[in-house]
Image (cartoon, rainbow, N blue to C red):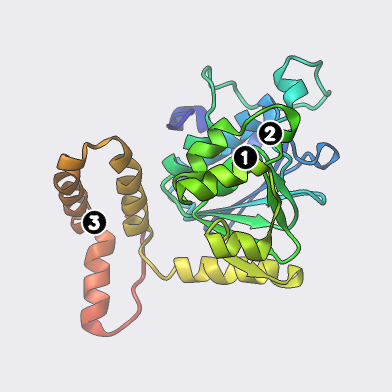
Amino acid sequence: MNYYDAGVLNGFSQKRFGYLKLVHSDKTLYINLNRPEKKNAMNPGMMNELAYAMAYAHHNPDVWAVVLRAEGDVFCAGADLKAFAGAGGDGVVSDIPDPGKEILLGELFLTVHKPCIARVHGPVYAGGFLLICGCHYVVAAEGASFSLPEVKRGLFPMQVMASLLQILPPRKTLDLCLRGKALTAAEALEIGLATHVCPADKLDQTVENLIAELYESSPNAVRMGLKAFDGLRSVPAAEAHAYLKSMLGQTIASEDFKEGLAAFTEKRKPVWKGR
């Protein structure tokens, strides 16, 4: 689900983000969670900004991938429960429009249809899992950790459970939710929660190497594939092949397919246009 249509994104570069730092460099949109004094706990304002930034990535053909990063020592402490309970404002100025409907983080990244990479330098807690589970790649520093402490606070990670079940077997998902045990980066890699683990001083280079590898592929083919993957969630199993055949037909009609075929024939690297 995209919470903002293309028209609402007019003047995006002039918008004031209070909870995120954004950099659009070349073909990559870098999004930094910027609430370090609260361990990047997500409040309604931050979630609006995330949805707005991801809508920009979705609608902008000049964005080929998204990298999610964080300021401070903690990647994300989950939801700011006091803020969602209606606690007073924090004085941060943000002029991002309200989408007018509830934002579901578990859906947000799936609907961008661009590769999303989480650069995890520190601990991820609770609802922060919705961010990393939504990303296609999780590049973690060796010292990062991952835990769901909700049951020790009298809660249960309900939405996180749904996201984890898209990645992990049911028993492993339930074990993480029931015991609240912290995983090391190596353990997260072993079970598939993280996709890459590296020393902290190699984190940025590992992310950039991954981006460079992704950009060797057709951005249109990648976008269409991720759109098809997203669409499969609502297609009955008996109709899946027919749906994917139609998506393949659209991809074959693209300029990138023609360029890829020509480059293969001419034994050269393709020059992608993303359409």
Q: 160 or 80, which is in the foreground?
A: 160
Looking at the rendered structure, the kind of residue marked 2 is Val
Which residue is at 69% across, 34% downward? 150
The residue that mark 2 highlights is 151
User: Residue 186 occupies which quadrant of the picture?
Assistant: bottom right
Q: Nearer the viewer, mark 1 or mark 3?
A: 1
- Mark 1 → mark 2, Cα distance in angstroms: 7 Å
Query: Badge 2: few (under 14), some or many (20 or more) residues near its Cα, within 10 Å?
Result: few
Q: Where is residue 172 in the image (x, y as percent from the top left)?
A: 53, 50
Across and down, in percent, residue 173 comes to: 53, 46
Mark with earlier residue (3, 2): 2
Height in image: 45 above or below 146?
above
For the residues bearing labels 3 and 2, Cβ distance under 8 angstroms: no
The residue depicted at 73 percent of the width and 58 percent of the height is 144
In this rendering, which labeled residue sits more in front, label 3 or label 2?
A: 2
Residue named by callout 3:
254
**Would you say the residues marked 1 and 2 are in contact, meaning their CB atoms lie under 8 Å apart?**
yes
Horizontal arrangement in the rendering, residue 253 relative to residue 97 (left or right)? left
Query: SS class of the residue under badge 3?
Result: loop
Which mark is drawn over residue 146? none
Residue 152 found in image quarter: top right
Q: Nearer the viewer, residue 135 or 274?
A: 135
10 Å crowding of disc 1: few (<14), some (14-19), many (20+):
some
Relative to residue 165, is residue 244 drawn left or right? left
Q: In which quarter of the image is the C terminus?
A: bottom left
Query: Is label 1 in a helix, a strand or a loop?
Result: helix
Q: Which mark, residue 178? A: 1
Q: Tell me the kind of residue under disc 3.
A: Ser
Q: Is residue 221 left or right of residue 181?
A: left
Classed neighbour count for the residue bearing mark 3: other residues with Cα under 10 Å, few (<14), some (14–19), many (≥20) = some
